């Protein structure tokens, strides 16, 4: 077994070290899924938090390090083989971050959208599509597609403008002008300033285990992502795996998750994205997909009117399509032919 520290011990293979940004929950989750995926195809792996993992790698020259973090925190470790795992939401990558990525041996991405974004932005280091299997954790499957007293809508994400919760709540109110016609639950992180919302819009800021969160999806009638951009869109994938019908745009990372005719499309416009959390996060020419509030309201009403049979069949097709791309069996087949991954199997022998 690999050392828990990622440091080679006598008589054992040195593991590939994945260092994941513990400050971003979704990155830690993707790092875990990637670690299990690589282990399943014969790559020795140790998964560590970014803060401690870098120190472990620096202590052992020659270590292969997969850096799973955000743009300004990428930093190749001297003496190591450095691989950057990039997730990016807009369709341009900041020039300063591009220069750092070009100092890495390789850049790994989970979706074709991010691969195209990096190439368009000037990344010259090899960009490799390495999809982790997304079905390692059991996701309880929805069994009943009948809508009860009111449509139950679920959304999930950090309290950040990029998630489009402002657009979703406005569209929800327009779609269902009377309280109790439907219910919207937004599961998010504590600390957001939400103001006063209607009583049928619930802001759920309670921290949950991953197991508890995955169990929640099946209790709703519809999952909605109004995000302006996603590098992957893990909650969309989780909802699909739960058999929950999805309403989302087909832009960005969503495109690798969604199957035509198996989701409710969200009307949107691709427009320049002038807003950023910090100035250094900005890239000239970057764009995002902004949902039409009225179009989203119509889509919500349409989903509520869709028959039980249609919603069940859509969810089934969506799940089969996702497993055909991100399921363990399919991912293992693709990685078996991926030279970048195959080269890691004999690391440290």
Image (cartoon, rainbow, N blue to C red):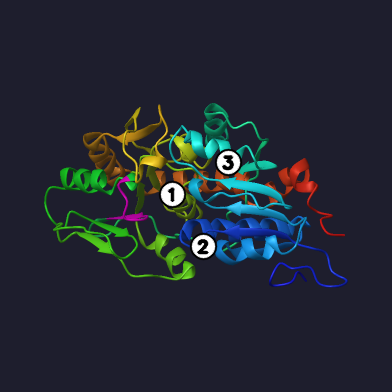
Vertical position of residue 217 compared to residue 268: above or below: below
Q: Residue at x 62, y 37 (%)?
A: 102
Figure check: 191 above or below 86:
below
Quadrant housing residue 212: bottom left
Judged left or right of residue 222, residue 43 is right
Q: Which residues are magenta?
A: 152-161
Query: Image quadrant for the N terminus?
Result: bottom right
Q: Residue 53, percent across and down?
A: 62, 64
Residue 174 at x, y percent in the picture = 16, 43
Pick whichever, 79 or 138, lies toward us. Answer: 79
Q: CA distance from mark 1 to mark 2?
A: 17 Å
Residues packed near mark 3 inside 10 Å, few (<14), some (14 to 19) or many (20 plus) = some
- Circle 2 sits in a helix, a strand or a loop, which is it? loop
- SS at badge 3: helix
Q: Earlier in the sequence, mark 3 or mark 2?
A: 3
User: Where is mark 2, residue-wise?
Assistant: 139
Can residue 259 be seen by looking at this rendering? no
Badge 1: residue crowd in 10 Å (few <14, some 14–19, many ≥20) = many
Q: Residue furthest front?
A: 78
Q: Which residue is mark 1?
A: 312
Indicate yes or no whether the magenta region holds residue 158.
yes
For the image shown, how many numbered marks are present on the structure? 3
Mark 1 in CB contact with mark 2 (< 8 angstroms): no
Q: Residue at x 66, y 47 (%)?
A: 83
* Residue, disc 3: 100
User: Residue farthest to the left?
Assistant: 178
Say whether residue 329 is visible: yes
Q: Earlier along the polypeptide chain: callout 1 or callout 3? A: 3
Q: Is residue 220 magenta?
A: no
Q: Is residue 17 left or right of residue 181?
A: right
Is residue 147 toward the left or the right of residue 83 in the image? left
């Amino acid at each position: 077994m690999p050392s828990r520290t990622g440091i080679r011990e006598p008589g054992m293979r040195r593991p590939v070290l994945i260092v994941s940004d513990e400050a971003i929950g979704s990155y830690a989750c993707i790092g875990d899924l990637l670690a299990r995926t690589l282990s399943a195809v014969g790559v020795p792996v140790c998964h560590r938090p970014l803060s401690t993992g870098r120190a472990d790698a620096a202590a052992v020259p020659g270590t292969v390090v997969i850096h799973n973090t955000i743009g300004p925190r990428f930093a190749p470790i001297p003496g190591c083989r450095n691989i950057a795992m990039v997730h990016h939401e807009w369709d341009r990558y900041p020039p300063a971050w591009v220069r750092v990525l070009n100092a890495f041996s390789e850049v790994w991405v989970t979706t074709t959208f991010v691969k195209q974004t990096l190439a368009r932005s000037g990344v010259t280091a090899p960009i490799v599509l390495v999809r982790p299997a997304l079905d390692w954790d059991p996701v309880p499957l929805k069994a009943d597609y009948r809508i009860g007293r009111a449509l139950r809508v679920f959304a999930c994400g950090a309290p950040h403008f990029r998630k489009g919760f402002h657009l979703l709540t406005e569209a929800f109110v327009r779609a269902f002008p009377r309280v109790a016609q439907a219910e919207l639950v937004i599961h998010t992180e504590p600390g957001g300033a939400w103001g006063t919302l209607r009583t049928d819009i619930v802001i759920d800021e309670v921290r949950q285990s991953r197991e508890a969160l995955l169990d929640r999806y099946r209790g709703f009638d519809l999952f909605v992502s109004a995000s302006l951009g996603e590098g992957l869109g893990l909650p969309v994938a989780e909802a699909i795996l739960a058999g929950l019908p999805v309403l989302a745009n087909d832009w960005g990372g969503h495109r690798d998750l969604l199957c035509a005719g198996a989701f409710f499309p969200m009307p949107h416009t691709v427009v320049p994205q002038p807003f950023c959390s910090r100035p250094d996060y900005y890239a000239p020419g970057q764009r995002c997909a902004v949902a039409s509030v009225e179009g989203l309201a119509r889509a919500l009403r349409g989903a509520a009117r869709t028959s039980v049979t249609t919603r069940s069949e859509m969810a089934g097709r969506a799940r089969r399509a996702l497993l055909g791309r991100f399921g363990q069996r399919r991912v293992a087949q693709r990685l078996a032919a991926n030279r970048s991954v195959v080269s890691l199997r004999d690391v440290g022998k």
